[in-house]
DNA sequence: TATTTTCTAGTACAATTGTACTAGAAAATA
DNA sequence: TATTTTCTAGTACAATTGTACTAGAAAATA
């Protein structure tokens, strides 16, 4: 592995553990056993670390989204996608732990983020519409309620990691299940009976997959 | 107003605007037109600013909670209390903008926070139980769903301010309505018919109160 | 092999920041 | 009025941090 990649990997790890503000360039170098000069050769600015890591995350999310099967709408796909998304978010959790501060300090990242936000919101709207048409969701959901479901989803996706860091003490698998339920459960009262069965079955299965 | 209070007020304002990490002691002194030495006389540590501000917030929340009328359960009380809570949170929003970082850097605050968390969670459980008994909420809500409603409420309460800062552009009143709906709307599908009417009427009224 | 490019360590330094300390003004109290 | 307490400004300084720069090693290329 090249030094540049090692730096990125170590930075990500330390950022996730301590928050990006607390971690200094020197911490990263120390942890990695290289000199500050070496770091400086690969990254002139500390900022570029954050931006590169953000870009990596976005790339992973993009790959995930483009792989969603659209033809047949199933709750389990919804849950599966969210599960995968949560894994990516956990991998880059420093970004969510310092959400406001990062967006405030790195205008380039904020702009990218806001662009994605628009795209993803449209995407969510379309998805839910398809779900209603295909009978996964009840058809009598008011537009206002649908909007709220989407908005809440966004807030929860951006903040579950903080809650997990502060409150959750359990293994990674349990954490995943807990927050998946937390975020996706908002659909529960709107699911059609068959979809609700599928929903509950998904989590039963997930619970059994639990690694001892 | 005493210098000490002026410092607290200015600090709060700057923290809310720029995040507590960005704001230096010097910024506060400059904004206030006093010397660093003066600041240092009133507050030996920058930390104590944060802790005092946190305590003020908790005190205001405590007053609010202790004033909740318990005898007759009504949705509008639930909404009213949340509205008041949101005002307090907006007043001290720096705390929520830098939630993870503050809890991570100030163990004293984290401990206080976690203690409150337990208390408030029990409180929420009791409240919802009363609501179910008195027919505000449907009586067939599963325990798991009830837990989720409470957990989601907590996450949303702690993170709506960040979302507002990043995404919302409107006046304070509109902001309040938007995020009140966002957070409290999760009860909507569980409300009894009469309570749902009350719920919708509350927001209709709120919308009309709108200051031009 | 000779030359160029890539990489690493080490040093230096400016900028930032919190806070300790001193001197004396202003206010309160005896 | 004399004395004590509270408050303010100003200076000094240590600690932290990011990054520029130099010298030379290591690797790649001609």
Image: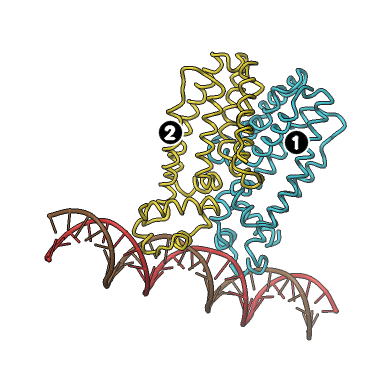
Chain colours: A cyan, B yellow, C brown, D red
Residue A56 appears left or right of A10: right
| Crowd class of label 2 (few under 14; some 14 to 19; many from 20; radius 10 Å) | few
Q: Residue at coordinates 53% horizontally, 55% vertically from top-left?
A: A22
Q: Quadrant of the C terminus of chain B?
A: top right
Residue B133 appears left or right of A85: left
- Quarter occupied by residue A88: top right
Disc 1 sits on a residue from what chain? A
Q: Report the disc number at residue A114.
A: none
> Residue A108, position in %: x, y?
70, 57
| Crowd class of label 1 (few under 14; some 14 to 19; many from 20; radius 10 Å) | some
Viewer-closest of B172 and B212: B212
> Residue A83, position in %: x, y?
71, 35
Q: Residue at coordinates 53% horizontally, 50% vertically from top-left?
A: B16
Helix, strand or loop under label 1: helix
Q: Which residue is mark 2?
A: B62
Viewer-closest of A155 and A6: A155
Q: Is residue B185 at all visible to an observer of this figure?
A: no
- Quarter occupied by residue A122: top right
Viewer-closest of B122 and B172: B172
Viewer-closest of A152 and A51: A152
Residue B59 appears left or right of A149: left
Q: Is residue B63 above or below residue B42?
A: above
- Label 2 in the same subunit as label 1: no
> Residue A8, position in %: x, y?
66, 57
Disc 2 sits on a residue from what chain? B
In space, the residues marked 2 and 1 are separated at their CA atoms by 41 Å
> Residue A134, position in %: x, y?
84, 25
Q: Which residue is mark 1?
A: A81
Residue that lies at the very extreme toward the front in this rendered image: B212
Mark in the foreground, 2 or 1? 2
Q: Is residue B77 at all visible to an observer of this figure?
A: yes
Helix, strand or loop under label 2: helix
């Amino acid at each position: 592995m090249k030094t540049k990649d090692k730096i990125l990997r170590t930075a990500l790890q330390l950022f996730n553990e301590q928050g990006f503000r607390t971690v200094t360039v020197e911490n990263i170098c120390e942890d990695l056993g290289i000199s500050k000069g070496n770091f400086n050769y690969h990254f002139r600015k500390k900022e570029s670390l954050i931006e590169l890591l953000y870009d990596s995350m976005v790339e992973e999310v993009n790959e995930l989204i483009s792989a969603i099967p659209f033809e047949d709408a199933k709750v389990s796909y919804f849950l599966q996608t969210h599960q995968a998304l949560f894994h990516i978010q956990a991998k880059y959790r420093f970004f969510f732990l310092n959400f406001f501060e990062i967006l405030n300090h790195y205008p380039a990242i904020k702009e990218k983020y806001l662009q994605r936000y628009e795209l993803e919101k449209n995407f969510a709207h379309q998805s839910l519409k398809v779900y209603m048409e295909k009978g996964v969701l009840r058809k009598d959901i008011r537009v206002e309620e649908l909007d709220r479901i989407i908005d809440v989803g966004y807030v929860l996706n951006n903040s579950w990691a903080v809650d997990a860091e502060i409150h959750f003490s359990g293994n990674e698998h349990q954490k995943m299940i807990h927050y998946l339920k937390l975020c996706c459960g908002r659909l529960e009262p709107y699911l059609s009976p068959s979809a609700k069965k599928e929903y509950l079955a998904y989590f039963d299965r997930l619970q059994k997959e639990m690694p001892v």
